[in-house]
């Protein structure tokens, strides 16, 4: 595969140097329009609007330094909240009418499932910046579509490993996930992995309320009757907020241990509704009090500026946006260099992205030859902290991408089933000491 | 299904049914009196909820006790009913009496579309919630399951209150009797000297206010987003059609029936939960198109 | 139920013969030409034109029902049924030609229309409307819930098909589909126009004025209405199939009741007096929606809602009706001026 990329790069460079074939050299644009899909309305907007703010802030910074390759970057936002069909029309319009050649899409796995083939068809570079559906890049080789973060496998395999490390003796589990691609896929990945390590676990309920549901009272009632040891939810955004609030109102959080795989994005909004002892995932190593980066001045400065700009601490969609934009920058830097300073074509950019690595605000992410991103995964347990009016993460652990991502060319679900229990305590896992304040 | 689960399902169903009744009764009395299906009714529900959430936010910001909401929620409902309902009726509904029924439906549909964008312009696209009152009222334990007092007592209580108040008003007060007269026969009521225009305006405002009350009460327990009005219209149609348009007693029974069907299906056939109201409506309409409780009318040629 | 004596002559009284106006033929021709030529200058406009054509066909279907005095707030379910049928066909029998997909989708929708219509057409007015609404919501909920069969709320993809056996790239495919849709639209517009002027079509209009008298004369209103219903279902199905093939995606939203309302909206906005009205209405609708984000802060619903209200009060016959009235007025003046009685 690397050879193929190399040959392509070589061929493109030769053509560029020839400077006769018009196709190999794209004219340098006056401005670089970047289409970005995010949730601007609906329950998921509490998640999507911070991503938009991050994009605007980071792009301002990039433009202040001269832009990408000397070209000013102009973001154009598409609302994912209007539904797949309307979003698709808007995506097409931006590409066909507005001439946008680079897209960052999307947040929702449902949107990515829709847009990835369309991007390939339209021959526009599409960086998936927040959707985990691993199958998109496993079922088919894409030339123009890459992912700048981890996927369902790394996220939920690490979740199983962390759960087994933190609460190894639970017997029953229930799941409450959003009824769409990610909710279904993440549960499938989780339970497949869990059954490998704990084959006798009992699943007492599988509840899939619809995406964007606003009322979870029936789900809460059922869980109260069943009293599982662990309640898993990979919900996010407004859905998760509402579910947790309604569950807390009726005391459900007291009876079961909750595991919120995407919960880092809701910590501040939920505040003290969340008790201590809730297992939280950060969907990558994204946390404003990241154990490795919180004392780094650049990191601190970003967190401070983001809080001043939006009034809230950055959450993982913000970090994902940073990763995507730095991947884009890295891709252009590589392509420009290989092109001898001339503006790259879309094909050259797409080729440059494969195999590139770049760091957003935290650890580096490598984009593999198959387009999948290799990202560290951070997990923790909630704990009250008097300095903030919401709980912070304690007993954190970080899982390296090579440990929890399927190798190139292998189906994740099959690979997971071949794992051994010894990886629960693999030495490559980074752990951080529990905070010393007495509980 | 053990007795604990049955009780759970019944309690959940009653609570949900109570909310459905509050919204459906508005549509049903408007149809009964004015013979118009108000497609903008869901917008009254949605705006009632948004306004109640805003008021809740003010209470919180002013550090006032959440119990004030008990007084303010009905006020919000009345404001929405009088202002929006009144505007809608006097500007639009009044002028389409006598027009083609297709046009009548479309006018209310156009009003619905306008209100959808109005919500987006005033309140934006983010979700709203306002649950201070619910938290303040605490929980009740029933057979080891915690229910919020709000869900168990306040909502069904309000629905019953509204039901009896309506019955009383319609049968005992002068205005109520005039309303029933107009519902029965508009022309004859005019000859009797009843100011039909005023009665229609009043009914429309009352119906809209009830829809808004449903929204104001609903926002305390759910998260409020765009599109919630569109969902609620079909649900309230389902209840009103099952009952028979214009039947208030029927609306209560139908609402409880649909609420119970939905909550039982969550335990027995969870995948069918969202379908239950529409399946019931379809079945009822197929076998008894006038609804379960209406009196058969001779078709006038 | 208003008594007949109270009934004011409704502007939608379709028992008026649709005037044989050459103007409408000219407008149809002009629209078709626009659809074919404008994309040469603005290639991206093909997709909105395809959507406009599809929704215009659906609005024609609903216009058939309006002619009988009934309105259905559930006809988007036929678009949805056809769309999903096309998605399943393209998945199971990969490589099927687009023409076969269109035929399949239309046929399936017509079949469903026959089955559903067989009991639904016994109802009138509000009950007819609500029953259609209820059924469409059942479909919507089922499609959204059964994730493993239908893709849930994410929907299903429709792979690009060949047209008349020719595999085209995206640009060529869109052009071919556009020409095909426009040709179909003109054919169907003509067919519907003939249908309205036929005995069956006149019987349909008679259902609106006095149904009992129609039965008395010996015509089965059940059969008349069922025929109209199946035709309307087939047209909505064709629209759904075109939409599915061009969008490449079907979602449960295609069958949501608000979509049904929009189809009714389009048919009234354009005017049911002549089939070209449906396409005029659909073009207005599609382009206001498209440009609302850029010029109207996204408030397309408010804009179109206001437009509809204005139309209902001042031009209830829709745009086509406005045009017809103007021409008739002109003709009337010419006649007066010419001194003819």
Image (spheres, coloured by chain):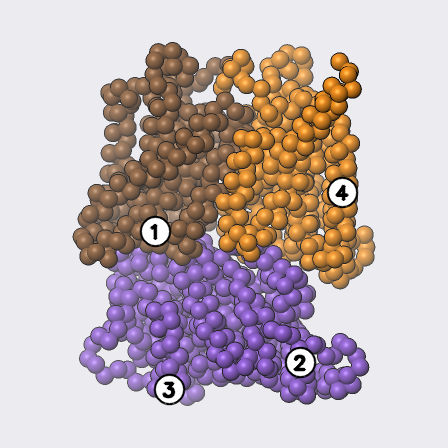
Chain colours: A purple, B brown, C orange
Dot 1: few (<14), some (14–19), or many (≥20) neighbours within 10 Å?
Answer: many
Within the image, what quadrant is residue A271 found in?
Answer: bottom left
The foreground one among C182 and A406 is C182
**C-alpha span from label 3 to label 2:** 34 Å
- Chain letter of the residue beneath label 2 in the structure image: A
Within the image, what quadrant is residue C71 found in?
Answer: top right
- What residue is shown with label 4? C30
Q: Are marks 1 and 4 in contact (CB under 8 Å)?
A: no
**C-alpha span from label 3 to label 1:** 41 Å
Q: Which mark is residue C210?
A: none
Callout in the foreground (1, 4): 4
- What residue is shown with label 1? B222
- What residue is shown with label 2? A343
Within the image, what quadrant is residue C58 found in?
Answer: top right
Quadrant for the C terminus of chain B in the image: top right
Q: Residue at x 55, y 37 (%)?
A: C308
Query: Could you say where residue A173 lies in the image, as x and y percent from the top left?
Result: 37, 64
Q: Which mark is residue A297?
A: 3
- Chain letter of the residue beneath label 1 in the structure image: B
């Amino acid at each position: 595969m690397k050879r193929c990329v190399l040959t392509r790069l070589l061929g493109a460079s030769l053509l560029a140097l020839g400077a006769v074939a018009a196709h190999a050299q794209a004219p340098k644009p006056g401005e670089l329009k970047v289409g970005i899909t995010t949730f601007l309305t609906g329950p998921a907007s509490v998640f999507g609007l911070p991503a938009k703010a991050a994009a605007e802030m980071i792009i301002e910074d990039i433009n202040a330094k001269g832009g990408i390759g000397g070209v000013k970057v102009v973001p154009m936002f598409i609302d994912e909240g209007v539904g797949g069909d309307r979003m698709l029309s808007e995506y097409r319009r931006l590409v066909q009418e507005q001439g946008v050649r680079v897209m960052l899409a999307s947040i929702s796995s449902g949107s990515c499932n829709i847009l990835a083939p369309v991007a390939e068809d339209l021959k526009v570079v599409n960086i998936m910046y927040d959707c985990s559906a691993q199958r998109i890049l496993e079922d088919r080789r894409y030339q123009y579509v890459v992912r700048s973060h981890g996927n369902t496998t790394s996220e939920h395999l690490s979740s199983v490993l962390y759960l087994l490390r933190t609460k190894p003796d639970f017997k029953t589990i229930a799941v409450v996930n959003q009824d769409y691609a990610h909710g279904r896929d993440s549960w499938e990945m989780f339970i497949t992995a869990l059954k490998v390590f704990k084959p006798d676990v009992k699943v007492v309920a599988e509840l899939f309320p619809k995406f964007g549901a606003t009322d979870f009272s029936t789900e809460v009632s059922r869980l109260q009757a069943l009293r599982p040891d662990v309640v898993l939810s990979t919900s996010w955004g407004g859905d998760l907020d509402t579910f947790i609030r309604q569950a807390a109102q009726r005391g459900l959080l007291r009876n079961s241990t909750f595991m919120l795989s995407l919960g880092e994005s809701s910590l501040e909004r939920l505040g003290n509704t969340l008790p201590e002892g809730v297992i939280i995932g950060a969907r990558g190593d994204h946390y404003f009090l990241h154990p490795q980066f919180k004392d780094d001045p650049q990191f601190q400065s970003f967190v401070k500026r983001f809080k001043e700009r939006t009034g809230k601490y950055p959450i993982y969609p913000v970090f994902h946006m940073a990763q995507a934009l730095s991947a884009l920058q890295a891709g252009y830097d590589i392509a420009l260099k290989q092109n001898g300073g001339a503006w790259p074509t879309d094909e050259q950019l797409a080729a440059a992205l494969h195999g590139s690595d770049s760091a957003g605000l935290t650890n580096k992410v490598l984009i593999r030859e198959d387009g999948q991103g290799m990202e560290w995964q951070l997990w923790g347990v909630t704990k009250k902290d008097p300095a903030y009016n919401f709980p912070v993460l304690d007993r954190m652990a970080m899982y390296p991408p090579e440990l929890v991502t399927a190798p190139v060319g292998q189906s994740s679900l099959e690979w997971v089933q071949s794992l051994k229990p010894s990886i629960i305590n693999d030495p490559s896992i980074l752990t951080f000491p529990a905070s010393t304040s007495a509980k | 299904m053990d007795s604990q689960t049955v009780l759970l399902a019944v309690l959940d169903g009653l609570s949900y049914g109570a909310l459905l009744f509050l919204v459906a009764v508005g549509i049903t009395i408007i149809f009964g009196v004015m013979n118009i299906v108000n497609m903008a009714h869901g917008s009254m529900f949605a705006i009632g909820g948004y306004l109640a959430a805003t008021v809740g936010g003010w209470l919180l910001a002013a550090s006032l006790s959440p119990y004030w909401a008990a007084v303010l929620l009905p006020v919000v409902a009345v404001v929405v009913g009088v202002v929006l309902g009144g505007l809608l009726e006097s500007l639009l509904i009044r002028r389409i009496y006598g027009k083609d029924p297709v046009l009548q439906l479309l006018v209310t549909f156009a009003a619905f579309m306008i209100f959808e964008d109005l919500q987006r312009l005033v309140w934006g696209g983010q979700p709203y919630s306002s649950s201070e009152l619910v938290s303040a009222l605490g929980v009740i334990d029933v057979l080891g399951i915690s229910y919020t007092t709000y869900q168990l007592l306040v909502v069904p209580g309000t629905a019953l209150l509204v039901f009896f108040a309506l019955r009383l008003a319609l049968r005992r007060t002068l205005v109520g009797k005039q309303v029933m007269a107009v519902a029965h026969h508009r022309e004859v009521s005019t000859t009797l000297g009843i100011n039909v225009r005023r009665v229609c305006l009043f009914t429309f405002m009352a119906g809209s206010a009830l829809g808004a009350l449903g929204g104001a009460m609903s926002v305390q327990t759910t998260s409020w987003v765009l599109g919630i009005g569109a969902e609620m219209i079909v649900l309230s149609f389902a209840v009103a059609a099952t009952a028979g348009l214009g039947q208030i007693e029927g609306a209560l029974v139908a609402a409880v029936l649909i609420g119970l069907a939905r909550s039982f299906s969550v335990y027995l056939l969870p995948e069918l939960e969202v379908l239950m109201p529409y399946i019931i409506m379809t079945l009822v309409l197929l076998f008894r198109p006038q609804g379960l409780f209406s009196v058969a009318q001779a078709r006038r040629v | 139920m208003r008594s007949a004596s109270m009934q004011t002559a409704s502007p939608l009284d379709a028992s008026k013969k649709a005037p044989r106006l050459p103007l409408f033929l000219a407008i149809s021709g002009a629209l078709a030409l626009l659809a074919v030529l404008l994309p040469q200058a603005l290639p991206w406009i093909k997709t909105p034109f395809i959507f406009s054509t599809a929704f215009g066909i659906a609005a024609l279907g609903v216009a058939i029902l309006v002619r009988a005095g009934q309105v259905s707030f559930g006809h988007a379910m036929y678009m949805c049924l056809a769309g999903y049928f096309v998605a399943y066909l393209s998945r199971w029998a990969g490589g099927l030609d687009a023409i076969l997909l269109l035929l399949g989708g239309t046929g399936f929708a017509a079949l469903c229309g026959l089955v559903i219509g067989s009991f639904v057409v016994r109802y009138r007015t509000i009950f007819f409307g609500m029953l259609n609404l209820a059924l469409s919501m059942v479909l919507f909920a089922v499609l959204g819930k059964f994730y493993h069969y239908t893709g849930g709320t994410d929907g299903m993809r429709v792979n690009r098909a060949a047209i008349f056996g020719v595999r085209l790239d995206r640009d060529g495919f869109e052009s071919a589909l556009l020409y095909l849709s426009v040709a179909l639209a003109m054919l169907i517009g003509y067919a519907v126009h003939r249908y309205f002027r036929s005995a069956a079509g006149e019987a349909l209009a008679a259902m609106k004025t006095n149904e009992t008298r129609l039965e008395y004369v010996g015509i089965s209103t059940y059969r008349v209405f069922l025929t109209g219903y199946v035709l309307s279902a087939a047209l909505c199905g064709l629209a759904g199939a075109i939409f599915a093939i061009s969008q490449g995606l079907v979602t449960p939203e295609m069958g949501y009741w608000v979509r049904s309302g929009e189809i009714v909206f389009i048919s009234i906005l354009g005017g049911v007096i002549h089939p070209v009205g449906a396409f005029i209405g659909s073009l207005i609708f599609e382009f206001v929606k498209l440009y609302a984000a850029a010029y109207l802060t996204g408030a397309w619903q408010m804009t179109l809602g206001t437009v509809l209200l204005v139309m209902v009060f001042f031009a209830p016959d829709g745009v086509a009706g406005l045009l017809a009235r103007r021409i008739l007025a002109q003709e009337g003046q010419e006649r007066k001026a010419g001194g003819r009685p």
